[in-house]
């Protein structure tokens, strides 16, 4: 945790800069974005998405049965929400959050995600919040698991039970966004298992939390693991959904 602490101290000592574009901030510091990036983020928040799979979808392109994509490639989870598409300035915020050790961005990003969850028609069915785990080697290098921090904000906003340790990553895997879709399935297949405390999800509504969903294979493997542990319903909340090169089954 030393690296995130040093980054936070630097943010206190040095003049504040926009966490997305790097411009100097002139406001009171309560929002980590400049005015231009704040407006751009607000526009992203208005972009519609499919309420079932979380992908980009126009207001008339999706319904209770999902959009064209998830009707062709059915998802295994029950529904999903996102903050926005993986575009600027949200992309820059996420990259600084996890790539530059900016754990101080977790409350801001987590609140955005918590607001999305609160507006979902299934919000009151969520009892347990489960972050997508990192392998311990990657967590040690980064100093934190970004999904843990996001899940904490979502849990606190809804007074829900935490579930850290109820899902574990059994082996390190290359980043999904760096792989072609044909390799993403095999990359994470079998990489997640119910943890020591997995019994706490049995018969309950579970919310899986992650930062970015690309092909959806990581979420699919996590969904399989929590279903194996007995989860009754599985929902998904991510900061962003990203396009990928070759759509295929999740």
Image (spheres, grey):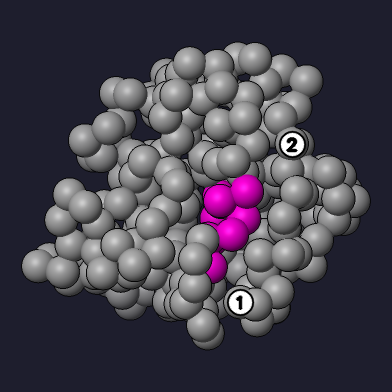
Residue 35 in the image: x percent, y percent? 32, 71
Q: Is residue 69 above or below residue 219?
A: below
Residue at which label 2 appears: 193
Q: Is residue 163 above or below residue 15?
A: above
Q: Nearer the viewer, residue 2 or 168?
A: 168
Residue at which label 1 appears: 181
Q: At numbered mark 1, what does the secondary structure look like: helix, strand or loop? A: helix
Taking the spot 67% from the left edge, 21% from the top edge, the residue there is 198
- State the quadrant of the N terminus: top right
Range covered by the magenta-colored residues: 210-221
Q: Nearer the viewer, residue 154 or 199?
A: 199
In the rendered structure, which disc, 2 or 1, sits on the residue that comes first in sequence?
Answer: 1
Q: Is residue 163 left or right of residue 249?
A: right
- Residue 145 appears in view: yes
Q: Residues within 10 Å of mark 2 (few under 14, many from 20)?
A: some
Q: Is residue 74 rendered magenta in the image?
A: no
Q: Is residue 219 rendered magenta in the image?
A: yes
Q: Is residue 19 left or right of residue 234?
A: right
Residue ranking furthest to the left: 60
């Amino acid at each position: 945790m030393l690296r995130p602490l040093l980054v936070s101290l630097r943010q206190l000592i040095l003049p504040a800069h926009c966490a997305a574009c790097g411009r100097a901030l002139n406001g009171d510091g309560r929002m980590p974005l400049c005015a231009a990036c704040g407006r751009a983020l607000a526009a992203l928040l208005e972009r519609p998405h499919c309420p079932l799979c979380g992908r980009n979808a126009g207001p008339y392109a999706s319904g209770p049965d999902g959009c064209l994509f998830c009707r062709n490639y059915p998802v295994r989870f029950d529904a999903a929400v996102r903050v926005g598409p993986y575009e600027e300035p949200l992309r820059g915020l996420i990259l600084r959050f996890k790539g530059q050790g900016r754990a101080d961005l977790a409350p801001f990003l987590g609140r955005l995600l918590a607001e999305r969850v609160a507006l979902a028609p299934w919000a009151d069915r969520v009892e347990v919040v489960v972050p997508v785990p990192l392998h311990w080697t990657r967590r040690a290098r980064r100093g934190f698991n970004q999904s843990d921090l996001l899940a904490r904000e979502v849990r606190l906003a809804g007074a829900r039970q935490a579930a850290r340790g109820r899902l574990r990553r059994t082996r390190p895997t290359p980043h999904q966004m760096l792989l072609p879709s044909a390799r993403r399935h095999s990359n994470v297949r079998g990489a997640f298992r119910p943890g020591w405390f997995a019994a706490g999800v049995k018969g309950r509504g579970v919310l899986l939390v992650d930062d970015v969903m690309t092909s959806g294979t990581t979420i699919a493997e996590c969904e399989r693991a929590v279903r194996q542990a007995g989860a009754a319903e599985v929902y998904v909340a991510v900061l962003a959904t990203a396009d990928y090169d070759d759509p295929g089954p999740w």
